[in-house]
Amino acid sequence: MHLRKREDLVNEPSTGPEPSSDVPPGGPGPVGTAGPRRPPPGPEGRGGTRGTPAVWGNVPPRNPNFTGREDLLEALHRRLRREKATAVLPNALHGMGGVGKSLLAVEYLYQHLGDYDVVWWISAERTTQIALSLVELAPRLGLEASSEATWSVAAVLEALRRGEPYDNWLLVFDNADSPESVRPYFPSGGPGNILITSRNPQWASVAQPLEVDVFRREESVALLRRRGPEISDDEADRLADALGDLPLAIEQAAAWRAETGMPADEYLRLLDEKQVDLLGLAAPLDYQLPVIAAWNVSLDQLEAKNPAAMQLLQICAFCAPEPISRTLFAGRPGGSIAPQLDAVLRDPIRLGQAIREIGRYSLARFDYRTNSIQMHRLVQAALISRMTETEQQRMRAGTHLLLSANDPNDPHNVSHWPRYGELYAHLLVSEAFRSTDPWVRALIVNEVRYLFRWGNFDAALHLAQSAYGCWRQDGGEDDAQTLEVSRWLGFVLFSMGRYTEAAEVNDRVLDAYRRTVGEDHEDTLDALGNVAIDERVKGNFAAAGQLSESVHQRYLRLLGPNDPETLRAAHNVGVSLRLTGDFARARQLDEETLHSKTQIYGQDHVVSLVTWLGLILDIRELGDYLASLTYQRELTDQAGRLLGHDNPFTLSTHRHLAVALRKAGRHDEARATAERARADLVRRYGEGNPGSMASTLELTIDLRHAGELDTARRLGAQIHRQYAATYGPTHPHTLSAEVDLAITHRLIGDADVARTIDERVLADFGRVLGQEHPSSLVCATNLASDLYALGEYAAALELDERTLALSTSVLGADHPSTLACAANLPLDLRALGRREEAERRHSSTAERLNRALGADHPAVRQAVDWEHRADCDIDPLPL
């Protein structure tokens, strides 16, 4: 499987704390270890098959000792066949731990291989693992994979809902926790089934529950006799009674007797002894003393026979109750864990012997297909409960050392994402973020970076916050690794739109770096660049530009002009120059930056594409609409070809293509493109995403051009409120949304409302950006049209003349915004009776408009007819 890679903020032409310059556009995706494409045949006599699913993934091996449960299997089969659409309700196997819910689901799948085209097993204890599994499913459904987890998950759910390419599927969400966290990953309808296994009784209210209880006594006896035929019915009955008929404990006891040959009476005596030892312990509700006692019998034997195997099992007890790849134990930890275990970890033969010893007592399951070992959570709990506090600390720390020894130390590289995805669950459960070991902490930072780049912002935020809280308490705010994870914490918060929190973190990090490493250290410059981005969010474009310029100049002195950090800083200067309205300087710098990036990375690398987009925006804002449309089409096609049509950067190019089409006069195509771009962005990232908000504003302009004024006004008012809530009422982006809304008000007939808006916005623009900023000039042009609509022709003429002079000076005489103002001025003159002057100016302006935009452009046709004033829109530029 290959997922496309993107730069940190590749959906917009500004970048984050570090570029992913060493990552090619494609690479293996963040998947767990999948099972075989086709399921293996099950043991004979356990249900026949008519065939095998076309897609079969991650299903655990079949238990050859599965016993009983015929009534539950039949009831489940009836329900799944009856409820063919997930829009009704999913089915949930629910019961306490150890009753065999997962094993029942696995057995059902093997008995009904031929009933489904797609069978996909999902470890559902954590939403990150659910997303990983769904991303892994994407290429198996024929979907083009994406570097963005949000898109891949959404695409898979939509394909399942539509039943394309398979209309007969079954998803199993194993060990699902709360319905609130898991249900967003269900397809909303579709021709398939969902099966849940869970200990959480809340699923009974949102799914059709099928309770899985302990064994019936005859099932317990049957399993005990299956593994030890010599046991009498009376002995098996007494043993089952002592173990409470809990399937997991029955299986463990049967394995113990099969391995040791211990008589039933002696085993019962050991159970009684262990229960006395356990009476003083506090145990969770669904741990029963006989069950823990049964495991302790086996654990005592294992510890006596093979201490290293016992220590290996103790390591596994601190991992997630999910498959643990054997390769985890192949890494050489950066320190000693325990003498016996250290020796085993250095010797693959002895490691294999220890794993086999564990399997003999059914204390864990080994899957030879995936080369992984897995412990049940109840066995883990029993094992941890028998350790002393010192042992727990040593083995938990040993788990952390093994995890860190498996860090690829390159979260940029997509080919390493499977390993980071595998490590994530175990470092989370083992609370590796509490470790003080520097290598373990380096793994935590890399996991945050991986989660962010993969697109799981929530998981990245949770891990970064957890690490920051612990590390700050241990080493203080100025500790180097605390600052490193803080830097990523701020960046994740920014990417989630939590701007105030991000700015607070970034300010604190910058102050700390200044104190500890000085002004010109790379870490300080990186932190200063993040603060510059915060200033853009606050609307302080000039201050942000000064900071960006300072960072760039210092990188030039420190690293030279062609270092990746210098080029990233140069790109960010271009972003600031665009926002301050200096499009000519932005174009010059972006051309130089793009040239250098192309030489270093190649023209097809995403880092180069990001700056190319910035350059195209420069060309568009400089008024060359036809050229910018040509380039924007090329970039959009290239991004789709290289990154995939649903890559977040490609989506941003579609949004900008819609603007370029409108500016070039292709209004129908612009609207269709804008509607598609907005729908994709909103569906995948929500309405509060910056790209979603910009696409909504841009669509209101297209609706206005199409004459759908009421819809344009309603949507325009909505998006203005959203901008105000996100950025504040006087942020330039919020003011731009008001300018666009005021035009719609005037065209509907509310010229008074439009005038009030434009007068206030023009004053705010003057304070925030300056009177000569292009946005101020556009607003002034529209205000003159408001005055004209209200019959105040002299005031309109005075404002148009002043604006025309400024626009000519700032943008040039042939810039479309300047020409729009020039086209309106003859209407002022004619209304005041100055017809001859009006005719002369009108003829000259129409000719210049024709040269700039082409005779077929709607603005040119309107300028000729003497009936329409030119309106100037503002499309907010990326921050």
Image (cartoon, grey):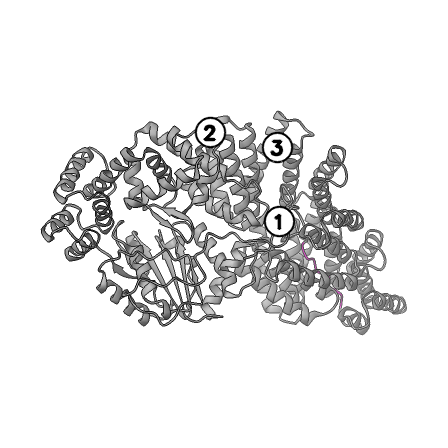
Query: Image quarter for residue 633?
Result: bottom right
Residue in the foreground of this view, choosing between 854 and 759: 854
Residue at the limit of the structure toward the left, as seen here: 234
Q: Position of residue 95 (x, y in %)?
A: 26, 54
| N-terminal-most mark, 1 or 3 | 1
The percent position of residue 120, horizontal first and vertical second, equals 41, 61
Give the number of the mark in front: 2 or 1. Answer: 2
Report x, y in % for residue 504: 56, 37
| CA separation in Å, label 2 and label 1 | 38 Å
Magenta region: 869-876
Dot 2 lies on which element?
loop
Question: What crowding class fits label 2: few (fewer than 14 Cα within 10 Å), some (14-19), or many (20 or more)?
Answer: few
| Residue at x 22%, y 52% (from the top left corner) | 227
Secondary structure of residue under mark 3:
helix
Which residue matches tag 3?
A: 510
Mark on residue 120?
none
User: In this rendering, which labeled residue sits more in front, label 3 or label 2?
Assistant: 2
Marks 1 and 3, Cα distance to the nearest angstrom? 21 Å
Residue 324 is at least partly visible in this image = yes
Specify whether residue 873 is painted magenta.
yes
Q: Is residue 879 left or right of residue 805?
A: left
Which of the marked residues, 2 or 1, is nearer the chain's N terminus? 1
The residue pinned by badge 1 equals 9
Of 666 and 793, the residue lying toward us: 666
Q: Amino acid at mark 3?
A: Leu
Is 878 in the magenta?
no
**How far from the left and from the top, in percent, is residue 102?**
31, 55
In contact (CB < 8 Å): disc 1 and disc 3 = no
Q: Which mark is residue 335?
A: 2
Circle 1: is it few (<14), some (14-19), or many (20+) Cα within 10 Å? some
- The amino acid at mark 2 is Gly
Is residue 433 at all visible to an observer of this figure?
no
